[in-house]
Amino acid sequence: MEFFKVIKSVMSAMIGVQNKKTLQEDFSKSSPIPFIVAGIIMTLLFIISIWVVVQLALGS
């Protein structure tokens, strides 16, 4: 599966706009491993970005 399609699917799922049809289509065509890895990476990036924003807001 294409890298950008996996990222798009994970981002859509993270913000809650992915429909059930797309979810079933993604998992029926390939292994869930790319989605799991992309989800972990996206979650870590989200946490780091929140931490950076908080640090900037606190002036540390």
Image: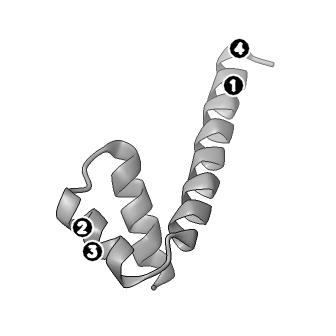
Residue 20, given in percent of the width and then of the height, sits at 21, 58
In the picture, measured across the screen, residue 58 lies left or right of residue 31, that is: right
**Label 3: element kind:** helix
Residue denoted by label 3: 25
Q: Quadrant of the N terminus?
A: bottom left
Residue count near mark 3 (Cα–Cα under 10 Å), binned few <14, some 14–19, many ≥20: few
| Whether label 3 touches label 2, CB < 8 Å | yes
In the picture, measured across the screen, residue 13 lies left or right of residue 31, that is: left
Earlier sequence position, callout 4 versus callout 3:
3
Earlier sequence position, callout 1 versus callout 3:
3
Whole-number angstrom distance, CA of label 1 to CA of label 3 = 41 Å
**Label 1: element kind:** helix
Residue denoted by label 4: 58
Q: Amino acid at mark 2?
A: Thr
| Extreme-right residue of the structure | 60
Q: Quadrant of residue 57?
A: top right
In this view, the mark in front (4 or 3): 3
**Label 2: element kind:** helix
Q: Amino acid at mark 4?
A: Leu
| Whether label 1 touches label 4, CB < 8 Å | yes
Whole-number angstrom distance, CA of label 4 to CA of label 3 = 44 Å
Residue 60, given in percent of the width and then of the height, sits at 81, 19
Picture residue at 69% right of the left edge, 33% below the top: 52
Q: Above or below — where is 50 with respect to 16? A: above
Residue denoted by label 1: 56
Picture residue at 71% right of the left edge, 14% below the top: 58
